Image (cartoon, helix red, strand yellow):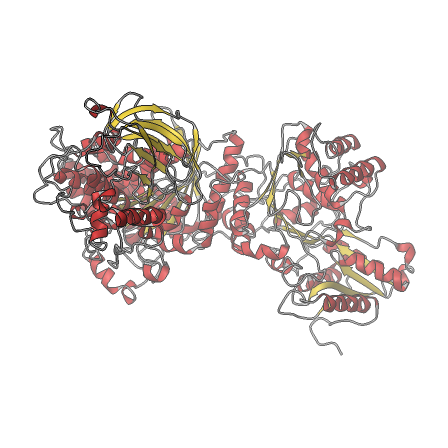
Amino acid sequence: MRFFFFVKVVPRLARPIVSTPRRRELLKVNVPTLGDSITEATIVSLETSAGDAVKADQVVAVLETDKVSVEVYAPQAGVLKDYAVKVDDTVVVGAPICTIDTDQQQQKAVVPTTTTTTTTAPVVAASTPVVAASTPVVAATPPQPVATPSAATPASHHHHHQHSSSGWEKKRSAPYFLSGSSGTYADAMFESWSRDPTSVHASWAAYFSTGGDFSVVPEGRSPETSSSSSYGADTMRALHLIAAFQKRGHERADLDPLKMSMREPLEDLDPRTYGFDPVADAHRPLRLSENSGSAVAGLLGSADVNGDGHTTLEELVEFLRATYCGTIGIEAEHITDLQKTNWLRSRIEVPRAPLTKEKRLHVLERLAYSEKFEAVLGTKFNTAKRFGLEGVESMIPGMKVMVDAATLHGVTDVIIGMPHRGRLNVLCNVLRKPVEVIFREFSGGTLQQQNKAAAADDDWSSSGDVKYHLGTSFDRAYPDGRRVHIEVLPNPSHLEAVDPLVVGKARARLDMKGDAQGDTVLPVLVHGDAAFAGQGVVYETFQMYDLEAYKCGGTIHVICNNQVGFTANPDQGRSTTYASDLGKAFDSPIFHVNADDPEAVVRVFELAVAWRQKFKTDAVIDLVGYRRYGHNEIDEPTFTQPRMYELIRKQKSVLEKYVDHVQTTAPVISKAEADAAVAAAVATFNDAYEKKDEYVWDEDIWGQNWAAIVNPKRIGRGAYDKTGVDAETLNRVGRALTWVPENFSLHRRLRPRLEQFREAMESGENITWGLAEQLAFGTLLLEGIPVRFTGQDVERGTFTHRHAVAHDQKTGEKHVFLNALGGDANLYIANSLLSEYGVLGFELGYSMETPNVLVLWEAQFGDFANGAQIIIDQFLASGEAKWMRQSGLVLLLPHGYQGQGPEHSSCRIERFLAQADEDPDVIPPNLDTLQGQTRQVQLNNWQVINPTTPANYFHALRRQQHREFRKPLVVASTKALLRHKLAVSKLEHFLSGNRFRRTYGEMFPTEIDDNQNIRRLIFCSGKIYYELLEARRHSQTKDVAIVRLEQISPFPFDQIANYAKSYPNAHLVWCQEEPKNMGCWYFVRDRIITATRFLNSNEQVPGYVGRTTMASTAEGYGQVHDQEQKKILQTALSNELTAVPFGRLH
């Protein structure tokens, strides 16, 4: 937070000496102390010129640092001799600023003896903020014998929440000038006063002589009251009053339509706090000095209601109350950027012109459609849940004017995410989803029932979702040629889960447009008040707003504030004063607005758009209303909120209130005009209800950029002949991976790595995981397919295996090896913030917008992926089935047991397998053909693989982008095999003609007996294969064959059956290192049985070898891990089992 210190030079007053000639004094004014840890400042402006006469307390220079802004004053009247600095100079504390001749006009009678006094301006700590657009700081007076506002006390500004509902106020314990960094100065003043009471300013003398009672006026000196005739006598009090309204006016704004709480007046907003007499001063012109600044003059001019050129106290207070305490309350004092706060005030602190009649009619019509939509649903479908918008219906005219305003600022795309409350209304009235379709959905119709086209086959289940979770899109054209694409993303009942998807989708669209600033795409997030304050993903999404890998030019947040969360009151749902307080952490302006004032709502939405387009940061609208019914329309709310709902029952609707308002205020809308607008909305909905059964809607369910992508109702072509690459292309990528720019200071440990890459590419041997991954990315880039890759530590790789980005050891400059290829596509790789939920959601949103980009997210360890479980469950696993939205997102989840404990061993692969949409008892047709295998993938919801060779990993990544459809890919990626001597590939396995292998059979048949003599056939997956292989070699076991599954889902029924048939006398065993209740066991067991029963006509039930059931994924002690691992290997190669299926082992 930036603190503003107001500095006044108060020199020690020279004590006159009788009968001694007057001494002429040249006073040097130096850079004052600026606060803790601040040692230098920049000269912003010089306020006068050499040779000019200056008054005492006149500003001579303005300084600024990254934390403070300072005005330096002339300590005494005189003539400014010269400046020692110029604008934009950097100066240190104590450096000279200027010299003032303090006695030049009194030298006629006496020849003075010239001396020079040096004065360093003390810091007077205050938290009074900037009050005007062009005034960088507000000048503070020397200590005055008037009350000082609590707003000026640093403790109340920085450390305490102001709870308006409780009436709690921070009491003032000391004048503001005695707090903070001015304590040292106060001590010095006291010491000087103790020696000579006349050596300090009179108000200091008064303070010390009364023991700290600042209400006592020093003898012989009147306080600066309203009766003072001095020029500018009201300046500081007026500025403090203005600052108080700017800071705390929102606390007494008229925001609650229900007016549930009676709030005590705030002392800070009382003119008497600053020494004004509300009666005597009410109608006299305020006396303001020139130093109040032009912008303050502008504010005061705005407050000059009668236009007589003078602003009275009454006019000022009324204007401030109208500006900051009306139906709009604004919080901006937390914003540290002066340009932003000044810009905002220049739009707030002006008289509000009434809406034109045309615009009023627009607001009325939109409000009528909003309210009557809910009314017709409540009438026609009175027993159905719809999560209506009643109580905040004005959100619809607000959102519609937001879209209109955004298009005037150059926005061409608006992407909206929102919970279920109000979604149907937004779909109908903002996105113009045909209301006939909505009515039909309430009647029980589904998209499948309406679509008469025959599907390619009937074995893909589109399960659908409830109507208030669905999304849609709409293209709107304006008469002047503007066009905008508006989209609402589908969202589950996890209220805020969609937030990162919206900003991810927005970033993707910006990238595709080449818009690096965020000018053309506007993300909008609608929240509930309880969810905004309570859901952590809101914070994670906010945190992305200024990160290079995630920023999208700012998001507009709309809090649909019902003042209740299901059945919980606000004091049960948050510790903060407002639901919106999270926005303060990110310097977002907070616009509170009463939802029962539609015109104020419209103004706020327009202002939020202007802010976002100007500064490209988030803005928060807190739309305060209520919820007319229960959580859903058939819920009874009076069980838990009886008083609130007693008030709600007495409330006229916002439409009724607005109809009355527009008939009695200018510009007037007649009763006939208002009635016609409302009647038109009712007629539209009644007509649509009658036509709902015949209405035909040709909706593009796949959205933009997906025209060439095949949905599951059509057979899509696979990538089986496209994943291999010619040698020349591979070598081109290899050369890029071993090249760095001239004079690039490469880390010494990376040079051997580049040499290993070079040797591997030249020899065609020992291709490692890191090299294979980069070859996959590079070959895609050369085909024009961009790659986006984020996650924690992905640039280097958690296990120091990737090094996709090198850092110059001298300059820190980055070099992305693959981007030296020089093609049209690039690798965008970036370390993410420390988040799983938000980042995975963002990347999923990105992938949903860009089917032609390979998008990957890597967990630091697979164990941490459960931090994003909501995204995995609600979107990734089921998004296509619920909403017909495809994604080709790749999840890399490091997995494998190495004795590193429960949180560094398992990606919980069993969870992904449990959600795989494939029947263990049904074998898909034609699996013996590549087309049949491709169709099996297409009809599944995702793929789960655990590759054991770099070449297979290479083909898995490339096939993601070379199919005619998209499926999420979950990779239980290896840790142990990254540098394993056996887990390497030959370059020939990457060449054209090769493809991803679903399984690997026995790779070393010469090391074992003939197939007829094989006693045990072990199926396994992942790195335990290499441990089994080495154990078999060590024990010289000859009668055990090992088969590994690379693709676990969709399950390779055909190949498993063939392996079982190849070893007619072998007993089948599944071996895994995970506990029995985890890993792949329960998934593969039934499918092995099905494969052998139906394809071999010889049902075989596999045995189990692995860890027993456990509550935790792994042991916490390395020695215990080693013992368990050894036991698994010994049991697997023996005649023993850990368990038999469906019963106990005897």
Image quadrant occupied by the N terminus? top left
Residue closest to the eye, 1001 or 604: 604
Q: Visible in this render: residue 508?
A: yes
Residue closest to the eye, 364 or 252: 252
Q: Visible in this render: residue 443?
A: no
Residue 963 lies, in percent from the top left, at 65, 40
The answer to whether residue 399 is above or below residue 559 is above
Image quadrant occupied by the C terminus? bottom right
- The image quarter containing residue 361 is top left
Give the tally of numbered discs: 0
Q: Is 82 left or right of 874, judged from the image as shown?
A: left
Residue 500 lies, in percent from the top left, at 48, 46
The answer to whether residue 161 is above or below residue 643 is above
Residue 404 lies, in percent from the top left, at 34, 33
Q: Is 225 left or right of 703, judged from the image as shown?
A: left
**In the image, what residue occupies the spot 54% across and 39% down?**
549
**In the image, what residue occupies the spot 19% across and 23% down?**
109
The answer to whether residue 441 is above or below residue 504 is below
Q: Residue furthest top?
A: 51
Residue 161 lies, in percent from the top left, at 33, 54
Q: Residue furthest front?
A: 19
Residue closest to the eye, 1141 or 637: 637
Q: Is 1050 left or right of 460, judged from the image as shown?
A: right
Residue closest to the eye, 603 or 618: 618
